[in-house]
Image (spheres, helix red, strand yellow):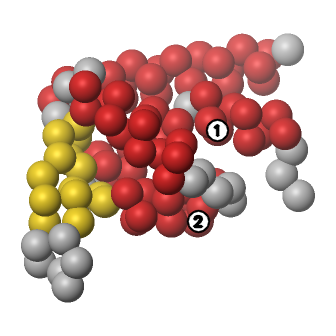
Amino acid sequence: MMSAFYKKTLRSLLDAVILQAINEEPNHGYSLILYIRTRFGTLVGPSTLYPALAELEKQGYVVSNWSFSNARPQKQYHITEKGKAALRGMQLDIEILVSSVRGV
């Protein structure tokens, strides 16, 4: 069973998790939900994910376009150079945090 601390921490790092997933490959919303569930063992619902994606797009970290290659159109999200730079900064912050927690 996952601790409440783990869930809260993951939610606070949701932007970094989303950017990392999109950096690996462009994704649509449902595939991001599956990525988070598979990789981190927790469910992030659409009501949490889509506002986060909208904010990342507003900040210029991701761009979206519609893909019509499947039976159903899907909005695909792609990371921008600004998003890659932000992700590098977030990863550094996470490493510093983890190092300080390990030192405690």
Percent across and percent down for residue 29 are 37, 57
Q: Is residue 46 above or below residue 102?
A: below
Q: Is residue 31 above or below residue 64?
A: below
Percent across and percent down for residue 94 are 56, 24
Instruction: Name the outermost residue toward the bottom.
Output: 71
Question: In this view of the protein, can residue 16 be seen by the observer?
Answer: no
| Badge number at residue 38 | 2
Question: In this view of the protein, can residue 72 be seen by the observer?
Answer: yes
Q: Quadrant of residue 19?
A: top left
Residue at 20% x, 85% y is 71
Q: Is residue 11 above or below residue 28?
A: above
| Badge number at residue 64 | none
Q: Quadrant of the N terminus?
A: bottom right
Return the residue nearer the eye: 93 or 75.
75
In the structure shown, which secondary structural element does the residue marked by tag 1 occupy?
helix
Q: Amino acid at mark 1?
A: Leu
Residue at 32% x, 30% y is 56
Q: Are marks 1 and 2 in contact (CB under 8 Å)?
A: no
Residue at 29% x, 58% y is 27
Percent across and percent down for residue 95 are 57, 24
Horizontally, residue 45 falls left or right of residue 7, namely left
The numbered mark, 1 or 2, whose residue comes first in the sequence reads 1
Q: Amino acid at mark 2?
A: Thr
**Residue placed under numbered mark 1 in the picture:** 10
User: Callout 1: few (<14), some (14-19), or many (20+) C-alpha neighbours within 10 Å?
Assistant: some
Horizontally, residue 46 falls left or right of residue 78, namely right
In the structure shown, which secondary structural element does the residue marked by tag 2 occupy?
helix
Q: Quadrant of residue 11?
A: top right
Q: Quadrant of the C terminus?
A: top right
Percent across and percent down for residue 92 are 47, 21
Return the residue nearer the eye: 24 or 77.
77
